Amino acid sequence: MSGTEALIRRYFPYDTFRKYQWEIARSIYDALSGGKVALIEAPTGVGKTASALAASLAYAEEDNAKVLFLIRTKNEAQAPIRELRRLRDRGGVNVDFVIIRNRPDMCCMVSTRKLPYEEFLEECKFLRSSGECPYYSNIRKININDLMPNIVDGGVGNVNEYVSTLCTHNVCPPYEVSRMYMDRARVGIMTYYYIFSINKPETMNIDVKNSVLVIDEAHNLPDAISSLNSIDLPLTSVVASINEVRRLVDDEELKNRTIKILRGGLQTYMVKLSKVLEEETMVSLELGDVLQFFEDFQAITDAYYEIIKRKRSAGVPIPYTPLSRLLDFHKAILNRVSGFSVFLARDEQGVSLVYKCVDPSVVSGPVINEAGGVVLMSGTLPPRDYVTSMLGISRGGIVEYRIGFRDYVRSENYGVLIYDGVTTRYVERDEEEYAKIANILSRVYQVYPLDKAILSIFPSYAVLKSVRKYLSPPSVKYIMELGNTSIDDLIRDLRNDRKRLIMAVAGGKLVEGVEYRLGSENLLGLIIIVGVPYPEPNDYLDDVMEILAARLNDRKLAWELTYQWPAIVRIKQAVGRAFRSESDRALVVLMDRRFREARLAKVFEDYFGKYVIVNEDALINEVLNFSVTPPH
């Protein structure tokens, strides 16, 4: 055994490598040693996390670097925590780690953490500066270098345990303690936010030049960077600001100047343009057209400070005003950073002005190209050209290692059906189509014989709600993804009653980075993709496509990468929920006639190697037969 292999094995949390795990670890180590970026694609369940940590820690030990394990959502923190805990339990190798989540999630004061994010930050700042947070003052009374290793050695199994354990030591916020311990810890587990956001209130100083970045679920990174570095100004905030100015600003001249900007300018402009959004979700605006409303911005600033002063003098515990949204938005658009544009956007909360990052490479390029090492891994990693173009990778080369779905999952353990009797195509969807989809889901649920859950994935929340109203409990026991739905609550429900129809949104929190397991038991036996989850065309995506077309010199490929590839990734991610080990078995149903179109059919034929087109009766029979027929 070579010295390199022995070092990697020292940090591997299992006695032996499963199929492909050594190859993943070796590819990552070689890439890091050669100053290259590692691109790793492997289906969920192969064991990417354990291999990536082992290789990165081995390299980091030799290079005296830190490992930053970066995740998109807090649910995804479970995997690295689990592997680091197993490493300690198996080989007695203790690796100091910290977990960084946003301040509200890591606050010990339950009442405060429930506040809206901006208001929480204001309250937290006030309580710390005034000495009224009893937990925060205790930071000075403890030795963090003694406390933190004991927390980790105590067997923290998940993020909630980590936070609650720190709170039992009367140390608040755990966010501050973790941030202070980052210098000593060998591994930091945190969301993309802390590395790939600019000008955000919780950004911390991290030496990326002396860090290995292990970026999990990296197919999400371009979109995540765009979202993290965008700032919006909702119409509702403008209206709320008008009401506060009228009530709380006494100076009549200042009041009139401010309301002229807000009501006569911004509100009128946004309401007028909102009519354009009846057909599109996002339209491009000229920056100059928006900046004209901020020419007398001193009035907004003066009104802001007068309102805050008045609230404080009145004893308001949280002196927050929606005018702060205008201040933040104005500051952002004045910067005029390359790669950003202004849009008017519409979502379920209403209309907003959005200063949005359209070229994530302006943020990610400097970070990735300067970092001590970079690993991009996912079960559905986009093509190399897309990754390098969108992220601005220009450092000394790429090492790729990709494992296909069929390389990992045995053919007898899955089936793929295309049901072409429905569609969610925008121009064809209507109430009749929604009712038809609901009827199919009901029939499938009623004949499905296994004591397992059915995961149904919808292209949008709007389609999900439209279908759900035609389902009739208790004949169909469903769990619908909501804003406050947590995976912990979902697994708890499935523990009590396995057979549920889970209704989730493509790319949402019940699909990405989630494990539907109880111990070694797989809770899913059937995946239904309702519709093709194409992103809705809009001016923002058109801008992204133009950037790709210019860099790749191929407009057709740019369109596929902008519109088709995200849909394919979302479908593959959903399918991956059912296959967490080589022994898992599940049926996949692609429910939309568009799956028969040549460009999609070829993709999924290459990916799965097989599929069968069925009508409604055949679909029901296939669900029943696959469920009761044991594998070969």
Image (cartoon, helix red, strand yellow):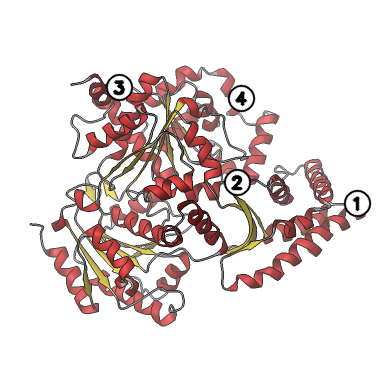
**Nearest to N terminus: mark 2 or mark 1:** 2
Residue at horizontal 51 percent and vertical 17 percent from the top: 143
Number of marks drawn? 4
Q: Position of residue 413 (x, y in %)?
A: 16, 56
- How far separated are the C-alphas under marks 4 and 1? 39 Å
The amino acid type of the residue labelled 3 equals Val
Residue at 26% x, 74% y is 443
Of badges 3 and 4, the one in the foreground is 3
Q: Is residue 124 above or below residue 136?
A: below
Q: Nearer the viewer, mark 3 or mark 2?
A: 3
Determine which of the numbered discs, if any, sits on residue 251 in the image.
1
Comparing marks 4 and 2, which lies closer to the viewer? 2
The one nearer the camera, 317 or 398, is 398
Q: Position of residue 309 (x, y in %)?
A: 81, 42
Going by the image, does 364 lie left or right of 498?
right
The alpha-carbon separation of the residues under discs 1 and 3 comes to 66 Å
Circle 3: is it few (<14), some (14-19), or many (20+) Cα within 10 Å?
A: some
In front of the other: 355 or 180 = 355
Q: Which residue is mark 4?
A: 137
The answer to whether residue 475 of the structure is visible from this angle is no
Label 3 or label 2, whichever comes before in sequence order: 3
Label 1 environment density (alpha carbons within 10 Å; few <14, some 14–19, many ≥20): few
Q: Could you say which is closer to the camera, residue 128 or residue 217?
A: 217
User: Where is mark 3, residue-wise?
Assistant: 93
Whether the residues at callouts 3 and 4 have beta carbons within 8 Å, the answer is no
